[in-house]
Amino acid sequence: DSAESIDTDIITLSRFILESQRASAKNATGEFSLLLNSLQFAFKFISQTIRRAELVNLIGLAGASNATGDQQKKLDVLGDEIFVNAMRASGNVRVLVSEEQEELIVFPHNAAAYAVCCDPIDGSSNIDAGVSVGTIVSLFRLTSDSRGNASDVLRGGREMVAACYAMYGASTHLMLTTGSGVNGFTLDTNLGEFILTYPDLRMPIEHPIYSVNEGNSVYWDAPIQEFFQRLKMPPADENSKPYSSRYIGSMVADVHRTLLYGGLFAYPSDRKNKHGKLRLLYEAFPMAFLVEQAGGKAVNDRGERILDLTPEHIHDKSSIWLGSRADVDKYLKHIGSAN
Ligand code: P6P
């Protein structure tokens, strides 16, 4: 395009992080900025691996072997290895929870200041269908009495210092909060840089979209069945239009749409999953933090704020209702009246 239309002062994620560091507490040591840079490296590497995998059809071929005959790894194992290696290499992470690892990972970095929880490739079961998948991350700063064990992550959601997700779709998007709003970035593959594309994102206060797996309806408690029934077939006296339904089945894609367009996303508990299906530390917590920071709400089936919860085990699950303030309030009002 012609010279005058080129933006010659683009804000990369690296520049954004450094500017935020300068604007934050004067004694910012840069550790946080370095960790965020290690995170963005992991996202770029996973993004490239996923796209290459789609090209050379690595996906879902567990057991297949490549030219050198070594065991082909499924993408979620690859994503996990990339992420763990990037966090180890940062030298700034003491403990790491990964959806792919049953046990807590403890690095021998005594000077490290952070605990990281992640789902390296969330939604990977959809990847063969070309559906957007993503990496979801929550960050905690170690307390002074940290001993490098599970107590560094079995903490209340409000203790998170940052949350982000990378979504590997047509483009690779990164949504990030460090507690002062949400900023969105898009990967420019030519530059190899995430560029600020959604500065200070605020989600719509309401939007008539509901996003839930209705195949679970028969397993829901009655109040939840009634709630969605009302969204679909509003009583005449409510003179409101029926909601539209959008469900992708990949949390990162469903939450990304909810952040940008508004509406309500839910994964309620049911008779099959008594505590819900989504994990607290690396799905519900980070998405709740991002949605709240964008002006929305995130609660569980009982209407408790997700960020007020504390996990007992690193892979604990939670029911979750998140989205536009007015839409989540509709649910809260419904259960308030039901109780
Ligand atoms: P269901 C993907 O497997 C995942 O963990 C989330 O990304 C997604 O929101 C949810 O599970 C989908 O679950 O039971 O609707 O297929």
Image: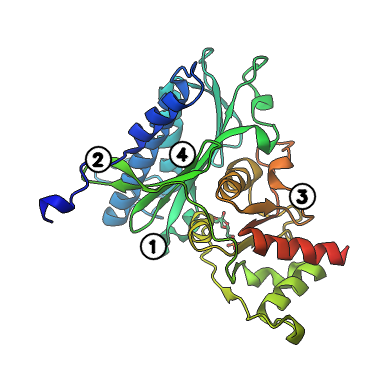
Decide: few, some or many residues near mark 1? Use Cα within 10 Å; few <14, some 14-19, many ≥20.
few
In the depicted structure, whether residue 131 falls above or below residue 110? below
Q: Where is residue 10 in the image (x, y as percent from the top left)?
A: 27, 42
Label of residue 304 in the image: 3
Q: Nearer the viewer, residue 97 or 252?
A: 252
Q: Earlier in the sequence, mark 2 or mark 1?
A: 2
Mark 1 / mark 4, whichever is N-terminal: 4
Residue 36 image point, x, y percent: 43, 31
Three-letter residue code for mark 2: Asp
Give the number of the mark in front: 4 or 2.
Answer: 2
Which numbered disc, 3 or 2, marks the residue that appears first in the sequence? Answer: 2
Q: Name which quarter of the figure residue 11 lies in.
A: top left
Separation of disc 3 and disc 2 at Cα? 43 Å
- Marks 3 and 1: CB-CB under 8 Å? no
Residue identifier under label 1: 130
Left or right: 259 as drawn, with respect to 15: right
| Residue, disc 2 | 9
Mark whose residue sits in front, 2 or 1: 2
Measure how far apart labels 3 and 1 are at the Cα level. Answer: 35 Å
User: Ligand 1 falls in which quarter?
Assistant: bottom right
- Asked whether 112 or 62 is in front, the reply is 112
Mark 1 secondary-structure assignment: loop
Q: Label 4 vs label 2: CA separation? A: 35 Å
Residue contact between numbered discs 3 and 2, judged by CB atoms under 8 Å:
no
